[in-house]
Amino acid sequence: MISNNTNGQFEHSLARGRMVDEQIINRGVKNEKVINAFRSVPRHLFVDANFSHQSYNDHPLPIGQDQTISQPYIVAVMTEYLDVQSNHKVLEIGTGSGYQTAILSHLAKMVYTVERIEELSLQARKILNRLNLKNIRYKIDDGSLGWKEFAPYDRIIVTAASEFMPVALQSQLVANGRIVIPIGKNSTQVLTLGVKHGNRLIQRKIFDCTFVPLISNK
Ligand code: SAH
């Protein structure tokens, strides 16, 4: 019998290993740094305690406030397309549970994350602090206009669906910078990669997806 502690850490780490092998590597994600980040971030800490037994399953989960933590595979694909380097400044719009933030924090130099719902931002910050991830700055605001103070960013990731490519975010990208964002309405959304060439953003469709909407008051 393998010993276990009361928090079920051993089960969680087994489930995490299976998640990485079956849902991420077997489906074609190749970037070793991305894969290692998924091996090290304890996803079960980012979901509501009632759902923690499902936290390594192959689907999104509720995180309160009518929002969701994305399916692990989707987080992995978005992260791989983002192609984050260790000297990068990354802007994330939609902190949510903070899970994607944790993954980015393992890969980037600094992560700037914006969330419009205060409760979610504060809860995410609590967990990320507990994990001792220090290269993260938080803002509670409508992120559809980005975060001008620290622009430009090498990479921008948006984890809520926008009806169009937000112009403000494009302007906060460095030359050759990349943005990964779901674009579209309700059930017709396309995960999109944008690469900035000069003042133009060359866009490429990744695949169809379903995210909660990016809500903008501005
Ligand atoms: N990356 C998150 C996914 C959260 S779902 C995770 O891993 O858990 C998308 C999040 O975007 C929600 O928390 C929602 O509140 C937030 N959001 C929606 N519109 C926003 C906006 N305009 N600015 C900032 N955050 C926004």
Image: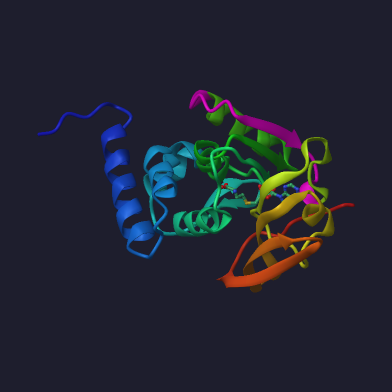
Location of the N terminus by quadrant is: top left
Magenta stretch? 130-144
Q: Nearer the viewer, residue 9 or 198?
A: 198
Q: Is residue 118 magenta?
A: no
The location of residue 62, given as percent across then percent down, is 55, 50
Q: Can residue 190 be spotted in the picture?
A: yes
| Side of 129 where 152 appears, left or right | right
Q: Nearer the viewer, residue 42 or 63?
A: 42
Tell me what residue is drawn at x 67 percent, y 57 percent: 179
Looking at this view, name the residue that lies furthest to the bottom.
Answer: 188
Q: As drawn, which residue projects farthest toward the left?
A: 1
Examine the rendered structure and indicate whether residue 122 appears above or below residue 58: above
In-front residue for pair 189/55? 189
* Residue at 83%, 59% in the rendered image: 167
Q: Position of residue 14 (x, y in %)?
A: 27, 43
Report whether 128 appears left or right of 1.
right
Residue drawn 46% across the image and 36% down it:
45
- The image shows a total of numbered marks equal to 0
Determine which quarter of the picture holds residue 165.
bottom right
Is 100 above or below relative to 105?
below
> Is residue 93 visible from the viewing direction of this image?
no
Where does residue 192 sit, x and y in percent of width and height? 64, 67
- Say which quarter of the image contains residue 206: bottom right
Q: How is the image coloured?
A: rainbow
Residue, far right: 218
Q: Position of residue 42 (x, y in %)?
A: 41, 37
Residue at screen point 58% across, 54% down? 82
The quarter holding residue 41 reads top left
